[in-house]
Image (tube, coloured by chain):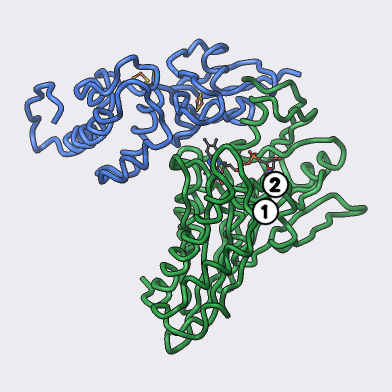
Amino acid sequence: MEHEITLVVNGAARRARVPGRRLLSDCLRHDLGLTGTHVGCEHGVCGCCTVLLDGEPVRSCLTLAVTVDGREITTVEGLAGPDGLSPVQRAFEECHALQCGFCTPGFLCTVTALLRDNPAPAEDEVLDGISGNLCRCTGYQNIVKAVHRAADLLAEERAPSAGEPPRDGEAS
Amino acid sequence: MKPPPFTYHAPRDLDEALDLLAEVDGKVLAGGQSLIPLLNMRLAAPAHVVDVNRLPGLSGIEAGPEGVTVGALARQAEVARAGVHPLLGQALRLVAHPVIRNRGTVVGSLVHADPAAELPAVLAVLGGSVRLARRAPGGTGVRQVAADAFFAGPLESAAEPGELAVSAFFPALPPRSGSAFEEVARRHGDYALLAGVCAVVTLDEDLHVAAARVACVGVGPVPVVADVSEVCGRRPAATVPWEAVTEAVRRAVEPEDDIHASAAYRLHLVGVLAERALREAAARAAAPP
Ligand SMILES: Cc1cc2nc3c(=O)[nH]c(=O)nc-3n(C[C@H](O)[C@H](O)[C@H](O)COP(=O)(O)OP(=O)(O)OC[C@H]3O[C@@H](n4cnc5c(N)ncnc54)[C@H](O)[C@@H]3O)c2cc1C
Ligand code: FES
Ligand code: FES
């Protein structure tokens, strides 16, 4: 039996006809063509498939598409704003926090929510926040740097009076 | 790595859910953080899945003087944020990762009854209970199952087919009590695969140990509760005969060998962790935050 569902993905209502067993990850990738959400392990361990469900990061490989009928999903494709990459995305670029990029969509969604809930996380809070995301390339050091850098960029955005400091592309 | 086909049901209230569970041979889907991996790996192939995520009134987290009642749809992250019980908070930090806790439910973890899961140990050491509802002739049958009867075996709880766990009750700590959860896992967020111990210690007015209990996981098919009050004796924590206490805890468990660790190593660990957890719990009881 198929189910008619509507998901609000990155701000736009999208309809799909899916069987009950369709994973949200597959619905996004195959039914809606949003292949930015990556799939690594399909049992919740790697974090690649993390998307935001009503703003909360969740594993799309451990969520049935029908369960979230009617709800809002943000994928990596929806993180950038009209002015380009989001602060978290810019920080990952600046700090060289990705190599092959396979894990990156999951990290970006996870970190976006982490910094919204905790705008100035301590080192151990960053480590705990990204502990459920695996990266086989970077060794994590630059990812951790990027999270701190993203926190700084977001703080600057919130306090525009402080003026835009020069951006030299160097990881701090 | 995709779920096998099943018929999906999304009841909109408790009555409809209980009717469905009575009619079809179905699996309850709550947070899905254990069930969907099992489906993806084809370790489970239910003909029907009854998704309870749309049921109203099951997300409550109610704290009273007696303890905390956690509804079936209260997510682990919400329960941790609510800060309603120190031991629940200490245990939830060890459960999986923040993102998994956004979906996973406290009650689902209890029903799933993984022998290395943290929350069953918490329910067991506190002597809590789970409320189960089912369709009964002319109404709803509800029973309250105490922790010691709830965990029946590895991945086996007292919840029967047709039953829905509606809430779990975690008794409050008595006055002058402290708690702690200590575990060893190879990777953070990977259950207490080697061993885990949670402890509750209550002190008397002279700050002598009045009661001390531990629950151990990862070292048997179900959480093993050991009351070590007598071994500790009515004395300050600093002079408790810790060697005798760890021996008593080791005698209570029968760990097995598996790919993660040998039985002998687990037996060693459980003693070390019990002492750490009990000392920490006693310190917290003496100096409440
Ligand atoms: C990567 C990863 C790491 C994890 N690490 C840990 C860990 O370290 N420690 C730990 O304890 N857990 C861990 N988990 C499991 C997690 O805590 C689950 O959320 C939990 O075990 C099950 O809760 P759920 O709500 O997701 O239940 P579901 O997956 O929806 O259901 C699990 C089982 O319980 C039944 N069930 C659920 N709710 C009810 C109900 N109300 N009534 C009747 N039956 C019900 C289902 O039918 C199913 O059989 C991990 C999971 C993942 C994916
Ligand atoms: S693909 Fe979802 S966690 Fe790995
Ligand atoms: S950049 Fe390759 S897996 Fe992370």
For residue A25, side relative to residue B56 (left or right)? left
Identify which residue, A6 or B3, lies in the foreground. Answer: B3
* Label 1 element class: loop
Residue B41 position by quadrant: top right
Q: Are marks 2 and 1 in contact (CB under 8 Å)?
A: yes
Residue B189 at x, y percent in the picture:
47, 42
Residue B286's disc is: none
Q: Quadrant of the C terminus of chain A?
A: top left
At label 1, the amino acid type is Val
Please tell me which residue is depicted at 33% across the width and 40% down the height of the picture.
A127
Badge 2: few (under 14), some or many (20 or more) residues near its Cα, within 10 Å?
some
Q: CA distance from mark 2 to mark 1?
A: 6 Å
Q: Residue furthest bottom?
A: B206
Image-based side of B260 in relation to A164, left or right:
right
Please tell me which residue lies in front, B160 or B265: B265
> Where in the figure is residue A134, as x and y percent of width and height?
40, 28
Q: Are marks 2 and 1 on the same chain?
A: yes
Q: Position of residue B233 (x, y in %)?
A: 52, 83
- Above or below residue B256? Residue B148 is below
Q: What residue lies at 51% left-to-right and 56% top-to-bottom? A: B268
Which residue does the numbered mark 2 point to in the structure image? Answer: B154
Give the SS element for disc 2.
loop
Which residue is labeled 1 in the image? B222
Chain B visual colour: green
